[in-house]
């Protein structure tokens, strides 16, 4: 009887672990789609919406190592940053983000570059797992995807809002890995402050560009 009970508990634990692993990989897929979508999007509203969904995926990966209540700080802070950028963009009335149309020059390059980054992530993730043990493979993959796509965003974009989105994406990727290594509440507060500071800086830059354009 004890053997049957133990076997049942092991089966339940194993099944639960599989379900959690599947959900984690779904979060990685969400991060891949949203980060690539921001790179290709010509509409700043869609880009901010994708960033908001991206923070949901970040929340789930961070919650693997932090309590949900503490990981939620990242989500709330991210959405506050999005609200700040959205209000500023609406107030500025900038249209250069939309000026190139849906399939603008360079879209094919962005798609190919994104694909190359994903291939590189798949190739180096096992090596990173060996260097930094104790972090799940899916978590490392999600982090590297955000860092890679975010750096690509920074490398090919000259528009202020796109640069801020790229910086927030790179920072989110870094925070995922750092959350697996450090679970201090002080660190969570510091990273949240950096996110908000970056969003406020971006809002100031957008406002400054609008002032220069109108003068």
Image (cartoon, rainbow, N blue to C red):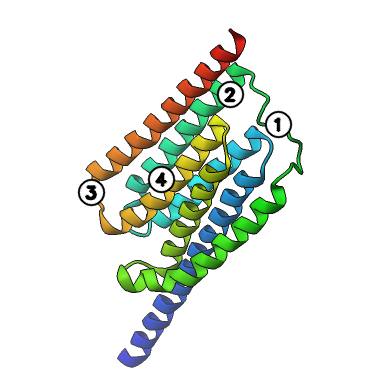
Say which residue appears at 23% left-offset and 42% top-offset. 186
The reply to whether callout 2 and callout 1 are in contact (CB within 8 Å) is no
Alpha carbon separation for disc pair 3 and 4: 17 Å
Crowd tier of the residue under label 3, counting other residues whose Cα lies within 10 Å: few below 14, some 14–19, many 20 or above: few
The reply to whether callout 3 and callout 4 are in contact (CB within 8 Å) is no
Q: Label 2: which residue?
A: 89
Q: Quadrant of the N terminus?
A: bottom left
Alpha carbon separation for disc pair 2 and 1: 12 Å
Say which residue appears at 45% left-offset and 59% top-offset. 144
Name the element at disc 3.
Answer: loop
Of tags 2 and 1, the one toward the viewer is 1
Q: Nearer the viewer, residue 106 or 61?
A: 106
Q: Label 4: which residue?
A: 171
Residue 138 image-quadrant placement: bottom left
Position of 100 with respect to 68 (left or right) is: right
Position of 7 with respect to 103 (left or right) is: left
Considering only order in the chain, which callout, 1 or 4, is on the residue closer to the N terminus? 1
Position of 21 with respect to 181 (left or right) is: right
Alpha carbon separation for disc pair 2 and 3: 34 Å
Q: Nearer the viewer, residue 81 or 22?
A: 81
Alpha carbon separation for disc pair 4 and 2: 21 Å
Q: Is residue 22 visible?
A: no
Rendered location of residue 168, percent (x, y): 46, 41
Residue 156 image-quadrant placement: top right
Crowd tier of the residue under label 4, counting other residues whose Cα lies within 10 Å: few below 14, some 14–19, many 20 or above: some
Rendered location of residue 208, percent (x, y): 50, 17
Say which residue appears at 45% left-offset and 51% top-offset. 58
Considering only order in the chain, which callout, 1 or 2, is on the residue closer to the N terminus? 2
Above or below for 123 versus 147: below
Q: Label 3: which residue?
A: 184
Q: Tag count in the figure?
A: 4
Q: Label 1: which residue?
A: 98
């Amino acid at each position: 009887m004890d053997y049957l009970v133990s076997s049942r508990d092991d089966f339940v634990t194993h099944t639960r672990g599989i379900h959690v692993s599947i959900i984690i990989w779904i979060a990685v897929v969400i991060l891949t789609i949203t980060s690539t979508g921001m790179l290709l999007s010509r509409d700043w509203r869609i880009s901010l919406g994708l960033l908001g969904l991206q923070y949901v995926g970040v929340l789930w990966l961070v919650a693997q190592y932090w309590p949900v209540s503490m990981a939620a700080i990242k989500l709330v802070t991210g959405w506050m940053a999005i609200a700040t950028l959205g209000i500023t963009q609406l107030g500025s009335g900038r249209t250069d983000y939309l000026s190139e149309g849906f399939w603008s020059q360079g879209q094919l390059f962005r798609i190919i570059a994104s694909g190359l980054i994903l291939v590189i992530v798949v190739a180096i993730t096992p090596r990173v797992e060996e260097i930094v043990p104790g972090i799940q493979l899916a978590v490392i993959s999600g982090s590297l995807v955000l860092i890679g796509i975010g750096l690509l965003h920074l490398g090919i974009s000259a528009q202020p809002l796109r640069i801020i989105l790229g910086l927030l994406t790179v920072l989110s990727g870094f925070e995922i890995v750092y959350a697996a290594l450090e679970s201090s509440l002080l660190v969570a507060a510091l990273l949240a402050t950096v996110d908000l500071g970056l969003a406020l800086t971006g809002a100031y830059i957008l406002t400054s560009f609008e002032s220069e354009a109108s003068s």
